[in-house]
Image (tube, rainbow, N blue to C red):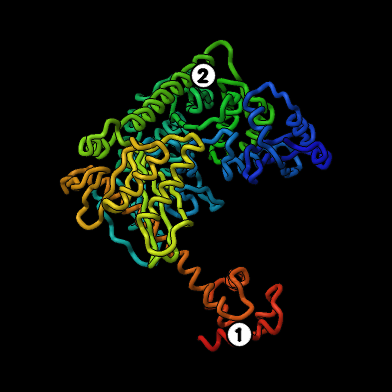
C-alpha cells in the first residue's frame, strides 16, 4: 500500500499516476484532476470494490507525471496505457496500428494508399479502419467509380511514361500521357474524398453539375464518363440502409462484456446512412467498471481518427464524460456533443450498436472455446500409440547437455496441445553430479522439477519425455517412485533410431515414421535438446572467457566478470591500454600492469 508519507510529496496538480508493485512492474495507470486527492483514495484499507482491494494490496510505489491541464493528462494516460499495457487497465486486443486510407493531395495527380501512420505531409487521411477487409472493398469500389492512377510514377515527369493496362480497361484516366487535365483529375479526387467522408449527397450533386457543364461544352466523352460514375454511385447508395432520418453525421458506440472479454462497436452514420462498422476486442481486469471500458475505447479510437463527427451516442456514461467531450472538441476543432440517449430514435441506434456488440462477443467467445477444445491429431495419435488412459495434452520434455561433465546443464520444455509454451521453459545447472553421468544428471533434473510441482501444488504433466534410452528412463522412473508418483506416464526417446522406451519394458516401441505422434515426440525432443545445448554453450563460453583471466595472479572469478562487463568483451579487454585498465573501479596500477602484460603476451 502507498505510504502516507509519500502522499505528502505528491503535488495538488493535474497529471497521471503510475501504481507499481514490489518488482517495479506497472500495475495501473490513471489520470487525475488533482493528483494528491485522487491518490488519497488508494490509502483506504477497506475498499468496496474487489478490483481495488486486489490492486491496493500489491501497490508499493507510485510515480506521477504532472501536466498543465486535465485534457493533457487524458492524452498522456492513453499513450502510457498503450505503451505499458498494465494488468489492471482495460487493454484493447490489437496492439498494432489500424490502417488509414491516404489520399496524396500533395502530388499533382494524387493516389490512394493504405498506410499505418498519419504524417503532416499535406495528404488527407481517412480512418482508422479496424475491418481491413471492408476497407479494401471500399478501395475497390472507389476504383470502379473513379479511374484514378495506381502507379508510383512522379507526374508530371521529365520522361514520358507509356500507358499501362489499367488505362486500356478504363481503370485509369491516363494522366501519365496527358489524357486528362490536372483540373479534371483533381475534380475526380474531390469526389473520392467526398465518398470516403460519407458525403454522398454532395458527391451526387457535384457529378451532376460537372456532367451538365461537360455536355454544355459538347465534351460528350467526359459527360458520358461522369454519367457512368453517377450511376455507379447511385447503385452504391441504394445498397446502404437509411436508419437516421435527421441526416446528422454521428458515431454510435456500445460494448458488451462477459467475464474478462469485451467487444466494442462503433457504427458510423453519415447523412443518415451507415457507412462503416468498426469493432474492437478487449481484455478486462476483474470487476472492471463498464464506463471505464467505454472511455478506453473512445480515447483509443479517436486519438488517431482522421474524422470526428459532431455527435457521439454512447451506451454507457463514462466517469470522465465532460473531459472526453472537451478533448474530442479539441481533436475535431469544433464542438462535439456526447449523449447517452434514454428515449426516441437515438435509443434505437444505440440498441443497434449493442446488438452488434453482443453478436461479436458471442462469436469471439465461441472462437476462443473452439481453440481450447480442438485437440490436434498428433495428440490423439500419441494417446493411441502409447495406450495412455488420458489425452497427453501437456507434455514436459527433459534433456542434458555437457562435455566430459563440465558445464553440465539440464533443460525442460513444455508443450500444450502440440504447441510450445516457451514462457514455461526452464534451465537447470547440475548441482549434485560430478563427472560424466548423464543418467544421474537426468534423475537430478526430473527430481527437482517434480519436487517443485508438488511443493507448489501445481498440475502434473500428462506425459514426461526424457531424451535417451533405458538408462535415462529408469533413472527418471526411480525418482518419480521416490516421490510416490510411480503412475506418472513417462517415456524415453532415443536419438539414433527414434525408439520409444517405456518403464519396465525391455524392448523399445517402434512408432511408424509417418505417424503424427512420432513427429510430435521428435519435435519436443529436438526442442529440449536445442534449449539445453544453447544454455550449455553460453555457460562454457563464459567459463572459457573468465578462466583465461583467472589465471592472472590477483584476478578471481568476481573481478574477471567485472572486467568483462566493463569492457564488453575479451577482445576489447585485450586491446585496452594500461591507462584504460586503471580507470576500472577498484583496479590499481600494479594489477593493471599485470593484466596488460599477461593479455598482450597471450595475444
- Residue 201 located left or right of residue 469: right
Q: Is residue 281 above or below residue 573?
A: above
- Residue 549 located left or right of residue 517: right
Could you tell me how many numbered marks the image carries? 2
Closest to the observer: 490 or 44? 490
Q: Label 2: few (<14), some or many (≥20) within 10 Å?
A: many
Q: Which residue: 31% across, 48% down?
A: 474
Asked if the residue at tag 1 contacts the one at tag 2, i.e. Cβ–Cβ closer than 8 Å, the answer is no
Q: Is residue 105 above or below residue 564?
A: above
For the question of whether residue 579 can be seen, the reply is yes
Q: Position of residue 297 (x, y in %)?
A: 55, 32
Q: Is residue 71 above or below residue 446?
A: above
- Occupied quadrant, residue 188: top left
Q: Secondary structure at mark 2?
A: helix
The CA distance from mark 2 to mark 1 is 77 Å
Closest to the observer: 559 or 352? 559
Q: Which residue: 27% across, 37% down?
A: 379
- Occupied quadrant, residue 6: top right
Foreground tag (2 vs 1): 1
Q: Secondary structure at mark 1?
A: helix
- Residue 268 located left or right of residue 388: right
Residue at image mark 2: 350
Residue at the outermost top position: 343
Q: Position of residue 387 (x, y in %)?
A: 22, 35
Q: Quadrant of the N terminus?
A: top right
Q: Position of residue 172 (x, y in %)?
A: 32, 48
Q: Label 1: few (<14), some or many (≥20) within 10 Å?
A: some
Q: Position of residue 143 (x, y in %)?
A: 34, 42
Closest to the observer: 597 or 186? 597
* Sequence-first tag of 2 and 1: 2
Residue at image mark 1: 596
For the question of whether residue 142 can be seen, the reply is no
Amino acid at each position: 500500500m502507498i505510504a502516507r508519507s509519500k502522499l505528502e510529496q505528491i503535488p495538488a496538480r493535474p497529471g497521471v499516476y503510475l501504481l507499481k508493485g514490489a518488482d517495479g512492474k506497472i500495475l495501473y495507470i490513471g489520470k487525475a484532476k488533482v493528483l494528491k486527492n485522487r491518490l488519497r483514495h488508494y490509502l483506504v484499507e477497506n475498499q468496496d470494490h474487489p478490483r481495488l482491494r486486489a490492486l491496493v494490496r500489491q501497490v508499493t510505489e507510485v510515480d506521477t507525471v504532472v501536466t498543465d491541464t486535465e485534457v493533457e493528462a487524458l492524452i498522456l494516460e492513453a499513450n502510457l496505457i498503450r505503451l505499458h499495457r498494465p494488468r489492471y487497465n482495460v487493454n484493447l486486443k490489437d496492439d498494432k496500428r489500424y490502417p488509414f486510407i491516404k489520399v496524396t493531395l500533395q502530388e499533382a495527380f494524387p493516389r490512394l494508399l493504405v498506410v499505418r501512420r498519419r504524417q503532416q505531409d499535406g495528404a488527407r487521411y481517412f480512418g482508422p479502419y479496424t475491418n481491413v477487409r471492408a476497407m479494401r472493398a471500399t478501395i475497390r469500389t472507389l476504383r470502379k467509380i473513379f479511374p484514378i492512377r495506381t502507379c508510383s510514377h512522379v507526374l508530371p515527369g521529365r520522361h514520358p511514361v507509356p500507358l499501362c493496362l489499367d488505362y486500356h480497361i478504363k481503370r485509369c484516366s491516363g494522366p501519365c500521357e496527358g489524357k486528362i487535365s490536372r483540373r479534371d483529375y483533381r475534380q475526380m479526387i474531390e469526389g473520392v474524398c467526398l465518398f470516403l467522408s460519407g458525403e454522398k449527397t454532395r458527391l451526387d450533386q457535384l457529378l451532376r453539375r460537372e456532367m451538365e457543364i461537360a455536355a454544355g461544352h459538347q465534351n460528350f466523352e467526359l459527360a458520358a464518363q461522369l454519367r457512368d460514375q453517377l450511376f455507379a454511385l447511385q447503385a452504391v447508395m441504394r445498397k446502404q440502409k437509411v436508419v437516421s432520418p435527421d441526416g446528422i453525421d454521428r458515431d454510435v458506440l456500445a460494448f458488451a462484456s462477459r467475464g474478462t472479454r469485451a467487444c466494442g462497436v462503433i457504427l458510423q452514420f453519415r447523412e443518415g446512412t451507415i457507412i462503416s462498422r468498426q469493432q474492437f476486442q478487449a481484455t478486462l481486469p476483474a470487476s472492471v467498471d463498464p464506463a471505464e471500458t467505454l472511455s478506453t475505447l473512445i480515447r483509443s479510437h479517436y486519438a488517431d481518427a482522421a474524422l470526428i463527427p459532431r455527435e457521439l451516442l454512447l451506451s454507457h456514461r463514462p466517469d470522465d464524460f465532460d473531459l472526453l467531450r472537451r478533448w474530442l472538441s479539441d481533436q475535431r476543432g469544433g464542438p462535439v456533443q456526447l449523449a447517452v440517449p434514454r428515449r426516441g430514435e437515438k435509443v434505437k441506434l444505440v440498441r443497434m450498436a449493442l446488438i452488434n456488440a453482443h453478436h461479436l462477443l458471442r462469436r469471439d467467445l465461441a472462437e476462443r472455446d473452439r481453440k481450447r477444445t480442438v485437440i490436434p491429431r498428433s495428440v490423439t495419435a500419441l494417446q493411441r500409440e502409447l495406450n495412455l488412459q488420458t489425452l497427453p495434452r501437456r507434455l514436459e520434455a527433459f534433456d542434458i547437455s555437457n562435455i566430459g561433465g563440465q558445464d553440465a546443464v539440464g533443460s525442460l520444455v513444455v508443450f500444450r496441445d502440440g504447441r510450445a509454451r516457451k514462457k514455461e521453459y526452464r534451465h537447470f545447472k547440475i548441482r549434485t553430479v560430478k563427472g560424466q553421468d548423464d543418467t544421474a544428471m537426468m534423475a537430478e533434473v526430473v527430481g527437482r522439477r517434480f519436487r517443485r510441482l508438488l511443493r507448489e501444488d501445481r498440475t502434473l504433466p500428462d506425459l514426461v519425455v526424457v531424451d535417451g534410452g533405458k538408462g535415462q528412463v529408469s533413472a527418471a522412473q526411480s525418482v518419480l517412485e521416490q516421490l510416490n508418483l510411480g503412475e506418472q506416464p513417462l517415456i524415453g526417446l532415443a536419438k539414433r533410431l527414434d525408439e520409444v522406451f517405456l518403464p519396465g519394458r525391455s524392448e523399445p516401441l517402434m512408432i511408424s515414421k509417418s505417424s503424427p505422434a512420432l513427429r510430435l515426440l521428435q519435435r519436443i525432443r529436438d526442442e529440449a535438446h536445442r534449449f539445453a545445448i544453447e544454455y550449455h554453450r553460453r555457460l562454457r563460453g563464459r567459463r572459457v572467457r573468465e578462466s583465461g583471466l583467472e589465471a592472472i595472479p590477483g584476478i578471481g572469478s568476481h573481478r574477471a566478470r567485472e572486467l568483462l562487463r566493463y569492457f564488453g568483451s575479451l577482445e576489447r579487454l585485450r586491446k585496452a591500454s594500461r591507462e584504460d585498465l586503471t580507470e576500472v573501479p577498484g583496479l590499481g596500477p600494479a594489477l593493471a600492469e599485470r593484466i596488460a602484460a599477461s593479455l598482450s603476451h597471450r595475444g
